[in-house]
Image: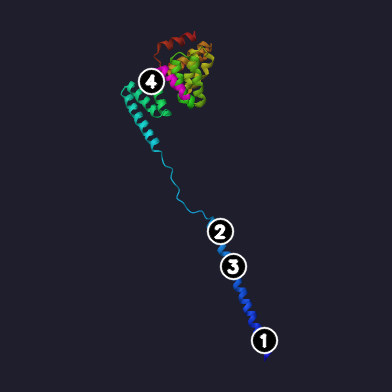
Amino acid sequence: MGSLIGLSALLAMRIAMRYRAVRKFVRSIRERSGKVKGETACHTVPDTPLERPRKNARTMHMVQEVRALERQAEKATAHGKYDEAEKLYIRALTVDPRAHDTQTALAKLYLTTDRDAKAEALYKEILMKIEDAACYANLGLVLYKQGKYAEACAAYERALEKDPSHAQRTFALGRCYMATGQYDMAAPLLERASIRLSRDTVLLRLLAECYMHIKDIDSAEATYRRINKLEPYDEEIKAKLVALAA
């Protein structure tokens, strides 16, 4: 009987010890789980709404003011009020001295109203900041009009480097070379331009003249025949063809 009681007590003690071990194991798991959750919470970056970049109100106002002045200048130009247009463009540049479009518009105004010295100065200033084929070409024209042929050649060359396929600028460069007496340089340029500008008799006349200067009689005659097809009643061209055939 005593042994039975002792065995029961021993069994109860083992059950209690096992239960205690299970509770301790569960508690340790809970503690570790809680620690992981805490660490995760610490490293989580809270969602914050992205702020949209705010436009500078002063910059917006400046752009709007410049554009308004440009529109007024364009209207004044359309009505032939060139002095008023110039003042409006200058006001716009006072507001924003870096306004590239305003500068080019003012330079174009000077060019088209034959204020060549002003146009030259402004185009050169523009080209110090940004290289633009159209500005180089317009500078070339301004220089050509002033008789600065060598400088005009350099400007047109830069324009063609930027846009080699432009026929009108190729023509202009050939004409500049003719003005400097470099007919051998002018002829291939004018010939190339005449492919695109095949009905431009001014160009063709210069080309024929150029061929005459370099003693290429066959090419000169062929060019005069091209002109004759376009202007069959031009007596001067007929006379040149007769003289070349003699």
Across and down, in percent, residue 2 comes to 68, 90
Does residue 123 show up? yes
Magenta segment, principal secondary structure? helix
Question: Which comes sooner in the sequence, label 2 or label 3?
Answer: 3
Q: CA distance from mark 4 to mark 1?
A: 123 Å
Q: Is residue 48 above or below residue 211?
A: below
Q: Residue at x 62, y 74 (%)?
A: 21
- Residue 119 belongs to the span the image colors magenta: yes
Across and down, in percent, residue 60 comes to 38, 36
Q: CA distance from mark 4 to mark 2?
A: 74 Å
* Left or right position of 192 against 54: right
> Nearest the camera: 129 or 45?
45
Across and down, in percent, residue 75 comes to 32, 27
Residue assigned mark 3: 29
Disc sitting over residue 6 in the figure:
1
- The three-letter amino acid code for the residue at tag 3 is Ile
Badge 1 crowding class, 10 Å Cα cut-off, few under 14, some 14 to 19, many 20 or more, is: few
Q: Is residue 241 above or below residue 41?
A: above
Which circle, 4 or 1, is nearer the viewer? 1
Does residue 221 show up? no
- The three-letter amino acid code for the residue at tag 4 is Thr
Q: CA distance from mark 4 to mark 3?
A: 88 Å
